[in-house]
C-alpha cells in the first residue's frame, strides 16, 4: 500500500491514507533579469542556486464519528514543523521538509475526513545512504550533484583538512564537526566553534566526480549527504 513517512512516522500508523501519489515539481533555478537601456531583451543572472519546492499531498481518513476530531488533531501534530519526508515508492531517497502546513479539512461524511498537507522542501532529494559516515577517506567519488558534507574531526590540537587541494585549518579538542551546509562548526557538546577554524566552507564541498581528501593532526569521518534534483 502506498504511504507517506514524515519525521520517521508513517501515515498508516495514524490510520491516515494518501489519496494518490503526489505530483512533485521540478526545482527552478533562482535568477534575476537585468534590463539595459537601448538593448532589446534582458540579461539573465543566476547564483546557480534553486528555489525550494512545495509538495502537496492529499490525505483522507475514516474513523468513528466520535473519533473524527481526535484523529485530525493527531494528524495536525504529526504534520507540524520540519523533518524528513519519504514516499514508499522511492524508499532510498528522502526530502528535507522545512515546514509543513495543512489546509482546512473537509468532513465529507460523518466518518470520512480529507485534507491537503503542503510540504515546503529543500529543492534537492537526498540519498539515505549518503548519511552514513566514511572513515578517513583519501578519495571520494561523487556520482550525484555537488554536495555539502559534514566533516567530523577527532583529536587534540591543530589539524589541517585538504579537499581537492584547498585547505582548512582547525583546532580540535575532542570532536569538532564542520557542517558545510549550515556553514557552522561545533564540538561534541553542541557549542559553536567557528572561531577555531580558518578557511572557506565552500572549499570543502564535494564536486561531481573524484574528490581527493587528506587530514593531518586528527582522525576524520565524512558524511557526504549525496543529493540530486
Image: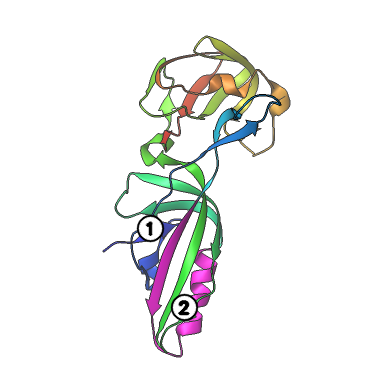
Q: Which residue is mark 2?
A: 71
Frontmost residue, 111 versus 56: 56
| Quadrant including the C terminus | top left
- Tag shown at residue 11: none
The residue that appears at 40% across and 86% down in the rendered structure is 111
The residue that appears at 50% across and 73% down in the rendered structure is 74
Q: Can residue 147 be seen here?
A: yes
Q: CA distance from mark 2 to mark 1?
A: 22 Å
The residue that appears at 41% across and 51% down in the rendered structure is 24
Q: Which residue is mark 1?
A: 22
Instruction: Give percent across and percent down for residue 89.
Output: 29, 52
Instruction: Give percent across and percent down for residue 53.
Output: 50, 48
Q: Can residue 177 be seen here?
A: no
Q: Is residue 75 magenta?
A: yes
Range of residues picked out in magenta: 54-79
- Mark 2 crowdedness (10 Å alpha carbons): few <14, some 14-19, many ≥20: some
Say left or right for 110 vs 201: left
| Quadrant including the N terminus | bottom left
Say left or right for 101 vs 12: right
Instruction: Give percent across and percent down for residue 132.
Output: 41, 35
Amino acid at each position: 500500500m502506498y504511504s507517506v513517512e514524515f519525521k520517521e512516522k508513517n501515515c498508516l500508523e495514524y490510520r491516515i491514507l494518501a489519496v494518490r501519489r503526489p505530483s512533485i515539481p521540478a526545482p527552478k533555478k533562482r535568477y534575476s533579469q537585468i534590463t539595459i537601456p537601448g538593448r532589446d531583451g534582458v540579461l539573465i543572472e543566476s547564483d546557480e542556486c534553486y528555489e525550494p519546492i512545495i509538495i502537496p499531498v492529499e490525505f483522507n481518513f475514516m474513523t468513528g464519528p466520535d473519533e473524527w476530531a481526535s484523529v485530525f488533531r493527531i494528524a495536525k501534530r504529526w504534520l507540524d514543523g520540519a523533518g524528513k519526508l519519504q514516499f514508499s515508492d522511492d524508499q532510498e531517497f528522502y526530502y528535507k521538509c522545512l515546514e509543513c502546513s495543512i489546509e482546512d479539512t473537509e468532513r465529507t461524511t460523518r466518518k470520512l475526513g480529507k485534507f491537503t498537507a503542503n510540504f515546503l522542501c529543500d529543492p534537492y532529494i537526498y540519498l539515505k545512504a549518503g548519511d552514513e559516515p566514511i572513515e578517513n577517506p583519501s578519495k571520494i567519488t561523487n556520482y550525484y550533484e555537488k554536495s555539502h558534507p559534514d566533516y567530523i574531526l577527532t583529536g587534540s590540537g591543530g589539524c589541517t583538512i585538504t579537499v581537492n587541494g584547498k585547505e582548512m585549518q582547525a583546532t580540535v579538542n575532542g570532536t569538532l564537526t564542520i557542517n558545510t551546509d549550515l556553514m557552522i562548526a561545533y564540538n561534541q557538546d553542541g557549542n559553536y566553534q567557528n572561531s577555531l577554524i580558518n578557511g572557506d566552507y565552500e572549499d570543502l564541498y564535494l564536486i561531481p566526480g573524484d574528490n581527493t581528501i587528506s587530514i593531518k593532526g586528527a582522525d576524520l569521518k565524512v558524511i557526504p549527504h549525496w543529493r540530486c534534483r
